[in-house]
Image (cartoon, rainbow, N blue to C red):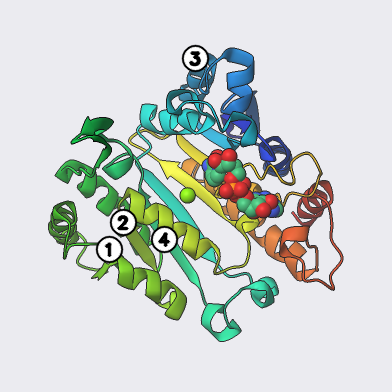
Amino acid sequence: MTKKTIAVLPGDGIGPEVTRAATQVMENIARLHDHEFVFKEGLIGGSAIDEKGGPLPLETKEISAASDGILLGAVGGPKWDRLPGANRPEKGLLEIRKSLDLYANLRPVKAYSALIESSPLKEEIVADVDFLIVRELTGGLYFGEPKKREDADGETRAVDTLIYKTSEIKRIAERAFQAARLRKGKVVSVDKANVLESSRLWRETVDDIRVDYPDVELEHMLVDNAAMQLIAQPAAFDVIVTENTFGDILSDEASMLTGSLGLLPSASMGSTDVGLYEPVHGSAPDIAGENRANPLAAISSAAMMLKYGFEMEKEAKQIETAIETVLADGYRTADIALKTEETVTTAEMTEAVIKAL
Ligand code: NAI
Ligand code: MG
C-alpha cells in the first residue's frame, strides 16, 4: 500500500466539475490497488480572489508544497477579466508554477483511434500521431525583466524581455532527452536561431546536453517551420522541446490535431518531486455548471500524476485503457460528438470510465 497526499485545486468555471471527475477515478484506482490517496482541497484563481482577496492564498501554497502532487482544474473567467494584472486569476497559476519551480511542462498529444473522424485533418495524417511537447515554463518572455510601460517620445511604449540562461536551457533539454529515451528516441528542438540571440544560446546548449544522450536523435527546427510541420506531418514527431512562448503557441496548435481540448492532459514538473497536473483547457465559462464538460483531460492528467509523480505505471495505464475503452464504446461528451451522435454528461462519462477500470 502506498499513501499519497494530493492537493486538489479546482479553480473556476468547469474546473470543479472536471477535477471532481478526476478524484473520483483516483479513488477507484486507490481502492483497486489498495493505495491511500488523501485529497486536500485549496482555493485558486477567481474563486480565491472572491473568498480570500487574492488568486493564490497562503493556505493553498502550503497545501500544495506539502503534497505529493497537485491536481488543478482551471482558472479565470469573464467575472475577473477587468481586474489589474497583479490580481488576476491567471496570476495564481503563474505564481504556483514559479514558487514550486515547475519549469517543465509536458503535454502528450495522441490520436485516439475512436475519434480520428473528429480531427480537422485527414485521417491518414493524424492516425499515428503520438508525441510529447516539453515546454519551458518559468523563463522567457513571460517573466523577463524589464517588463513595463513607459512614455517615450510623446507616446506609450511597452517592453517585454526574452531572457534565457544556460542553466534554464540545460535542465529542460535534459528532461526532453530523458523523455525521448522512454519513447521513440527522437528530439526536435524548436527555436528561432536565425533571428533571436536567446535562440542561438538555446541551440548551442541543447547541442552540449546532447553529448550525454548519444542514443537520442536530435534535430533543430525553426519555430515557423515547426508550426507547418505539425500540420503537414505531425506523426513524424516524438519529443518536441521549446521555450515558453513558442511552446505555448505550438502546444495549442497541436491540441487541435486530435479534435478537442477536452481530451488533453498536462504535467508541470520541477526540481522537486511535487508536480502539477492539469487539463490543457481553460475554465470554459460558456458551459460551466451545466454538467457538459468533457472530464477526460482532467482524468488523463490524474493518470499523468500516477505515472510521472508516483511511479504507478500500471495504474496510469489502467486509466488510459479505460479512456480508450469508453471512447471505443461510443461515449461522447458534446465537444467530441459528431452531429449524429448522442451525448453523455460529465457525470455519465466519469461513471463509464470508472466502470471500465
Ligand atoms: P477554454 O479552454 O476555457 O475554452 C475554449 C472552448 O473549448 C470553449 O468553447 C469551451 O467550452 C471548450 N472547452 C474547453 N474545455 C472543455 C471541456 N473539458 N469540455 C468541453 N468543452 C471544453 O479557453 P478560453 O475560452 O479561451 O478561456 C476561458 C477562460 O479560461 C479564460 O478566463 C482563460 O483565461 C482561462 N484559461 C485558463 C487556463 C488554465 O487555467 N490553465 C488555460 C486557458 C484558459
Ligand atoms: Mg496557452
Q: Give yes or no for contact between labels 1 and 4 (Cβ–Cβ under 8 Å).
A: no
Front position in the image: 236 or 317: 236
| Residue that label 4 marks | 250
Looking at the image, tell me whether mark 4 or mark 2 is earlier in sequence order: 2
Front position in the image: 307 or 335: 335
Q: Secondary structure at mark 4?
A: helix
- The residue carrying pointer 4 sits among few (fewer than 14), some (14 to 19) or many (20 or more) residues within 10 Å by Cα, namely many
Q: Quadrant of the C terminus?
A: bottom right
Disc nearest the viewer among 4 and 2: 4
Looking at the image, tell me whether mark 3 or mark 2 is earlier in sequence order: 3
| Residue that label 2 marks | 242
| Residue that label 3 marks | 58
Q: Position of residue 337 (x, y in %)?
A: 77, 66
Q: Quadrant of residue 35?
A: top right
| Residue that label 1 marks | 189
Q: From where the camera sits, is residue 42 visible?
A: no
In the image, what residue type sits under mark 1?
Ser
Q: CA distance from mark 3 to mark 4?
A: 33 Å
